[in-house]
Amino acid sequence: EVQLVESGGGLVQPGGSLRLSCAASGFTFSSYEMNWVRQAPGKGLEWVSYISSSGSTIYYADSVKGRFTISRDNAKNSLYLQMNSLRAEDTAVYYCAREVGATGADAFDIWGQGTMVTVSS
Amino acid sequence: SYVLTQPPSVSVAPGQTARITCGGNNIGSKSVHWYQQKPGQAPVLVVYDDSDRPSGIPERFSGSNSGNTATLTISRVEAGDEADYYCQVWDSSSDHPGVVFGGGTKLTVL
């Protein structure tokens, strides 16, 4: 079964750090581009970051640039999001999502169940 | 940055047709993808590349894209279609590409 499972969420104080993980199974992880998407409570979807299949190309949303770092370990079938200098507005459910296609403007066909990050003192 | 505009809500009776729009500047030149999200669940891709359906998605879901508006059409609406729907595109117009989501539309089945 094709599956993505996030972990690492929790409660953190403003200014703190957290590292999210996304474990992939059921497909050749190294062949797919991956993304992180978040959703604040009661709000819509917000894209966070993209990483190419090899890890050589990375993009960030302006709201997290300079504070978050996306990475992947294809040998471990895992995607990561290192989050530093966390703010209250980073509070959200964080999803990892697989990108399908080869056009460079592709859809997210597989999503994890999400992991909740709460930034609060 | 690129902006996608969706109506906050759409209501439709069972068996009728729901149309959810997604407006953006010259969106017809982009590939639009649509997601369905039910409460407490992760989003599910229902239409990609404007009008294609992933396997397992009913034929009742269809999409179109032209000019400044993309549309998700749900025919013969069922109670189980009640959910939030989001459109999505890639914006490569600036020097740092990124993904843009619409604000979402809550579909209510009366």
Image: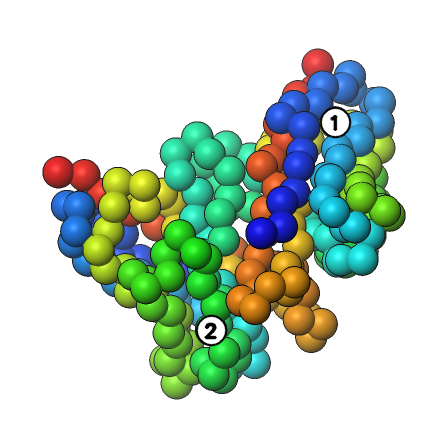
Q: Secondary structure at mark 1?
A: loop
- Is A61 situated left or right of B45 in this image? left
Q: Chain of mark 1?
A: B
Q: Which residue is mark 2?
A: A58
Instruction: Tell whether B74 sits left or right of A110.
Output: right
- Marks 2 and 1, how far apart at CA: 40 Å
Q: Position of residue A18 (x, y in %)?
A: 22, 58
For the residue pair B9 and B69, the one nearer the viewer reads as: B69
Image depth: mark 2 or mark 1 in front = 2
Q: Is residue A20 above or below residue B1?
A: below
Q: Is residue A18 left or right of residue A113?
A: left
The residue sitting at 69% across, 75% down in the picture is: A102
Residue neighbourhood size for the residue with mark 1, other residues' Cα within 10 Å, grouped as few (<14), some (14–19), many (≥20): some
Q: Nearer the viewer, residue A78 or B29?
A: B29
Q: Is residue A112 something that shows in the picture? A: no
Q: Is residue B29 left or right of residue A28?
A: right
Quarter of the rendering containing residue B22: top right
Residue that badge 1 annotates: B78
